[in-house]
Structure formats: structure tokens, C-alpha cells
Amino acid sequence: MFSKKIIWLCILAVLPLSLPVEAADAQLLIDRAHYWSKLGRSELAVFAWQDLLLVEPDNAEALAALSQAAAAVESVAVVAPAVESVTAPVVEPAPVTEPVA
């Protein structure tokens, strides 16, 4: 079976994921959100901002960033269909041929 060492390593690997976020981690979450935003990964930045609001529910920076993200999502939802209609490839209909008897 598995050795005790492997079992403990698995427990320790999962443990940080289940611990609650503490107030001391607020700056880390802010840094993480800025990092993901700079890389263009706004969905991951949103997760960091949401985690920050669990620690500091009145954090103005997180609230502003999430409202900007919501506005961006709304504008994409409005603009995306128009862009798709303009950039959709034109499909030429296949020529009609007479069936061979």
C-alpha cells in the first residue's frame, strides 16, 4: 500500500487550498490580482479580487476592479455578436449539378 510519508505529503499538498484566507494575505491577493490583470487573465484576477473581498469586504480597489470587470463582460456580450457577423467567413454554396442517370 502507500507509505505514511506519501500520505502525509498528499495531505500537506491539499491543506493550503482548504485554509481560510487571513487578513495578512490581503496584500498578496492584491498583488495576485494585478499580476493576472497584467497578463490579460482577467478571469483569474476576478477570483483574486473576490478572495480579497472575503477578507476585506469594503476594499475599494477590489470593488472598483470587479465593477470594471462586470462592465467589460457586458460590453463584450453586446459587441461580440456584431463582431462575429462581420468576421464570419462567407460560405459559397456548392454548385448544383444534374444527377447522372
Image: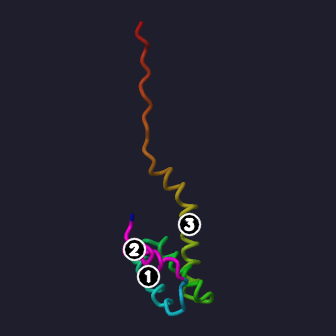
Q: Nearer the viewer, residue 79 or 36?
A: 36
Choose the circle earlier in sequence order: 2 or 1.
2
Q: Earlier in the sequence, mark 1 or mark 3?
A: 1
Q: Which quarter of the rendering shows the C terminus?
A: top left
- Camera-side mark, 3 or 2: 2
Residue drawn at (45%, 47%) of the image: 88
* Magenta stretch: includes residue 1: no
Circle 2 is placed at which residue position? 4
The amino acid beneath tag 2 is Lys
For marks 3 and 2, give the CA distance: 53 Å
- In the picture, the quarter occupied by the N terminus is bottom left
Horizontal and vertical percent for residue 57? 62, 87
For marks 1 and 3, give the CA distance.
25 Å
Amino acid at dot 1: Arg
- Residue pointed to by mark 1: 32
Q: Is residue 93 left or right of residue 49?
A: left
Residue type, mark 3 in image: Ser
Q: Which residues are magenta?
A: 2-19
Q: Quickly name the residue at label 3.
A: 75
